[in-house]
């Protein structure tokens, strides 16, 4: 037999699990948004590097002095370093997303377990109520039958 205390404790655990799952979902959404921003920044850097490299090629065709060539090369090297950092930042962010997603899944599984337990308890209570109602009906029918038999002349 399930007590009201057990039910209220289960309700509280379910509520806490739902809150934890929701918080994990919000964090996952933020991490995914950061991932998208990081990807966009990386793409911007790739485009900028391609444009600057094209400018260098154009300048070399037209003729470029050594100092300008050196500046172009230095700037491209700094863009390459920025690209390497951005790629690493994206890889790190992808790992954070994966970790956060796994945390959300764990919280969802926990909530599902509590929901399943709640459903089982509700079904068990319904069955108990149905059995009690049936017993009450059976007792009523039996008492009517006994009354009729005792009332009937022999």
Image: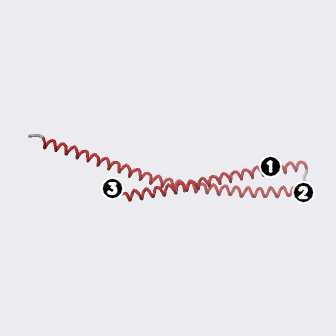
**Residue at left offset 89%, top offset 58%:** 67
The picture places residue 27, in percent across and down from the top left corner, at: 59, 56
In which quadrant of the rendered view does residue 4 lie? Answer: bottom left
Which residue is denoted by mark 3 in the rendering? 1
Residue lying at 66% horizontally and 51% vertically, measured from the top left: 36
Q: Tell me the CA gap for discs 2 and 1.
A: 20 Å
The image shows residue 149 at horizontal and vertical percentages of: 14, 42
Tell me the tag on residue 51.
Answer: 1
Q: Is residue 77 left or right of residue 101?
A: right
Q: Residue at x 88, y 48 (%)?
A: 61
Determine crowd level at label 2: few under 14, some 14-19, many 20+ residues with C-alpha closer than 10 A: few
Q: Is residue 110 above or below residue 134?
A: below
**Which residue is at the far top?**
153
Identify the disc placed on residue 11.
none
- Mark 1: secondary structure: helix
**Labels 2 & 1 near each other (Cβ < 8 A):** no
Which mark is first along the chain, 1 or 2? 1
The quadrant of the image that shows the N terminus is: bottom left
Query: In x, y percent, where is residue 80?
Result: 76, 56
- As drawn, is 60 to the left or to the right of 23? right
- Which quadrant of the figure has residue 82? bottom right
Q: CA distance from mark 1 to mark 3?
A: 74 Å
What quarter of the picture does the C terminus occupy?
top left
The answer to whether residue 133 is left or right of residue 81 is left
**Which secondary structure, mark 2?**
helix
**Element type at marker 3?**
loop
Q: CA distance from mark 2 to mark 3?
A: 89 Å
Q: Determine which of the numbered discs, if any, sits on residue 66 in the image.
A: 2
Name the residue at 52% across, 55% down: 21
Closer mark to the observer between disc 2 and disc 1: 1
Question: Which is more foreground, mark 2 or mark 3?
Answer: 3
Indicate which disc, 2 or 3, sits on the residue closer to the N terminus.
Answer: 3
């Amino acid at each position: 037999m399930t007590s009201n205390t057990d039910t209220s404790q289960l309700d509280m655990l379910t509520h806490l699990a739902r809150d934890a799952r929701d918080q994990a979902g919000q964090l996952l959404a933020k991490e995914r948004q950061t991932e998208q921003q990081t990807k966009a920044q990386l793409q911007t850097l790739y485009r900028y590097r391609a444009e600057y490299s094209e400018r260098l090629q154009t300048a070399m065709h037209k003729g470029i002095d050594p100092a300008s060539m050196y500046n172009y090369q230095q700037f491209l090297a700094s863009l390459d370093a920025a690209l390497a950092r951005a790629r690493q930042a994206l890889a790190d962010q992808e790992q954070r997303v994966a970790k956060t997603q796994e945390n959300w899944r764990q919280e969802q599984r926990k909530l599902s377990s509590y929901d399943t337990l709640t459903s089982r308890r509700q079904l068990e209570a319904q069955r108990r109520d149905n059995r009690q109602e049936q017993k009450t009906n059976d007792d009523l029918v039996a008492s009517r039958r006994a009354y009729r038999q005792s009332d009937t002349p022999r």
